[in-house]
């Protein structure tokens, strides 16, 4: 809620324009190689509104493409760097040719504190325009729904329900139309690739996903689901009656065609940087491990619970004098800074540890997709579990990354029991306490991070429960062959 309050200020107009231009200047001209600081004050006004908005990399993209051999990817005009793959830079470069007709000054690399209402206008209209792809992708997904069981009322029709859940997803509306990251456009690519796989147009689905990866590399989280499903359902052309694989049906031609699609897309994206020996610099920007385990705003995942437990144990240890106050790490996880820190009681977590945890969490769903095939629906559930597992155990996960799991999950049937309903209703009193009661208490100065900690921990409990429940349903469901026999 605190994050929402800060971001919602951008709706008011002038503040949003200032924020948008500030974000533009933070990102403009930096390329992939800027060696700026990642320390960010906790709750700094307007900083998180649209850090990665549509304008922030336009001039950066221009500079990067103009002089790639003269250090275009090593410039350091601003501390804020372009941490998206090359296709997104080209996308911003194209937008910059439209942005100049709104306000030329927003494209000035060194004009870091510039703001204008025209910048805000361009950001909003460009995001809305690119959402056309998202709308089309939702339409294609709705065509994949079985229409045999259709209610008489419009609100009972599955296609109508799915379209409303996707098009009016409140989280996406907040992130995309206040944060200006073009997530609707990117999620449109993902949903369209999923729809193509449901329609058995596997090559198109593989191509769209390969393109998507070079727009935003966060979708690497769900790449295992795509790879295993395409290998299982496309490269192997037949199954046995019980649903197991028929090994002699393997098609080398289809494997080569899929590999060629991925290779050509990757060559188009990364080839110029490879030729100029700048690929390591690109990867250093795409995977900034020095930012620390958690974002300043904790994502409600396993590490939020881990951090909270460490904090509770450290407080108890200090009260009981088991810990020396002088030995408490200065880089605290509750300082509100985006940085590396050491845990006080529990072992500190490294990027390698998060990678291992993520792989372990993903593997069961991958094995189920291979050994217990359930068709496109099984692929969709595996994709959702891959996204949820990476959100649960990934390194420096942003809270908005939950959209990667929520949007595909809309094709599942949501059923809430009394306990789940009670949990969701509990969010209301929690936010009332954090936003209206806590500011008037004496704890506001002493424990400023407490509302965010409580919100992250409460939400982490719910997401952990949803992840576990979905996993159980995937593990106990029978393969397609056995289901048909029954």
Image (spheres, rainbow, N blue to C red):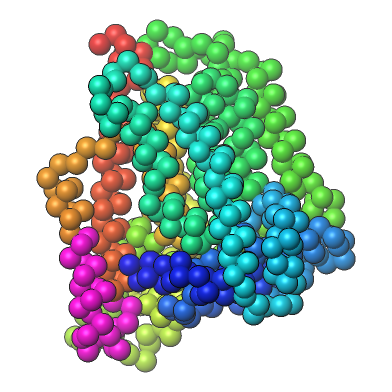
Residue 157 quadrant: top left
Asked whether, in this view, residue 228 is left or right of residue 364, the answer is right
Which quadrant, please, contains the N terminus?
bottom left
Mark yes or no: residue 190 visible.
yes
| Residue 424 sits above or below residue 59 on the image | above
- Residue 383, given in percent of the width and then of the height, sits at 44, 37
Image quadrant where one finds the C terminus: top left
Residue 459: x and y, percent?
Answer: 28, 59
Residue 206 % position (x, y): 61, 31
Q: Is residue 129 above or below residue 46?
A: above
User: Does the image show residue 80?
Assistant: no
Check residue 480 for magenta coloring.
no
In the displayed orientation, state which residue is furthest to the bottom. Answer: 326
Relative to 11, residue 191 above or below: above
Q: Which residue is drawn at the image coordinates 37% and 34% (left, top)? A: 162
Residue drawn at x 28%, y 66% is 455
Residue at (58% x, 29% y) in the render = 205
Asked whether 250 or 385 is in front, the reply is 385
* Vertical placement of residue 62 versus 257, above or below: below
Residue plotted at (50% across, 38% down): 135
Foreground: 428 or 449?
428
* Magenta stretch prevailing secondary structure: helix
**Side (left or right) of 100 relative to 166:** right
Q: Name the quadrant containing residue 99.
A: bottom right
Residue interval drawn in magenta = 427-450
Answer left or right for 447 relative to 185: left
């Amino acid at each position: 809620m605190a994050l929402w309050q800060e971001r919602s200020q951008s709706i008011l107009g002038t503040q949003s324009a200032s924020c948008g231009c500030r974000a533009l200047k933070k990102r403009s001209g930096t390329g992939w190689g800027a060696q700026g600081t990642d320390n960010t004050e906790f709750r700094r006004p307007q900083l998180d509104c649209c850090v990665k908005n549509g304008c922030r990399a336009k001039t950066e993209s221009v500079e990067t493409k103009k002089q790639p051999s003269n250090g275009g990817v090593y410039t350091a005009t601003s501390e804020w760097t372009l941490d998206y793959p090359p296709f997104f830079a080209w996308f911003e470069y194209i937008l910059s040719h439209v942005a100049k007709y709104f306000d030329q000054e927003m494209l000035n690399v060194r004009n870091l504190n510039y703001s204008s209402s025209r910048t805000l206008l361009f950001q909003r209209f460009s995001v809305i325009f690119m959402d056309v792809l998202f709308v089309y992708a939702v339409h294609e997904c709705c065509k994949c729904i079985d229409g045999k069981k259709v209610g008489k009322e419009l609100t009972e029709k599955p296609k109508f329900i799915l379209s409303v859940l996707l098009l009016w997803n409140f989280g996406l509306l907040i992130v995309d139309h206040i944060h200006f990251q073009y997530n609707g456009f990117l999620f449109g690519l993902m949903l369209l690739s999923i729809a193509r796989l449901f329609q058995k147009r596997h090559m198109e689905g593989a191509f769209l996903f390969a393109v998507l990866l070079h727009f935003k590399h966060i979708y690497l989280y769900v790449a295992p689901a795509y790879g295993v499903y395409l290998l299982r359902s496309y490269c192997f052309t037949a199954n046995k009656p019980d649903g197991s694989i028929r090994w002699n049906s393997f098609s080398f031609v289809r494997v080569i065609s899929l590999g060629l699609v991925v290779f050509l897309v990757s060559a188009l994206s990364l080839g110029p940087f490879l030729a100029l020996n700048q690929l390591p610099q690109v990867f250093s920007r795409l995977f900034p491990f020095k930012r620390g385990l958690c974002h300043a705003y904790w994502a409600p995942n396993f590490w939020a619970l881990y951090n909270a437990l460490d904090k509770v144990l450290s407080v108890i240890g200090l009260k009981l004098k088991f810990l020396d106050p002088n030995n408490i790490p200065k880089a605290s996880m509750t300082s509100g800074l985006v940085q590396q820190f050491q845990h006080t009681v529990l072992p500190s977590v490294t990027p390698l540890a998060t990678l291992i945890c993520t792989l372990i969490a993903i593997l069961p769903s991958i094995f189920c997709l291979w050994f217990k095939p359930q068709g496109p629906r099984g692929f969709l559930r595996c994709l959702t579990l891959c996204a949820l597992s990476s959100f649960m155990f990934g390194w420096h996960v942003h809270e908005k990354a939950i959209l990667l799991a929520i949007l595909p999950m809309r094709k599942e049937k949501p059923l809430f029991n009394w306990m789940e309903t009670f949990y969701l209703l509990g969010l209301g009193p929690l936010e009332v306490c954090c936003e209206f009661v806590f500011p008037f208490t004496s704890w506001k100065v002493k424990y400023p991070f407490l509302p965010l900690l409580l919100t992250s921990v409460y939400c982490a409990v719910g997401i952990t429960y949803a992840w576990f429940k979905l996993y159980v349903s995937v593990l106990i469901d029978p393969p397609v062959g056995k289901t048909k026999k029954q």
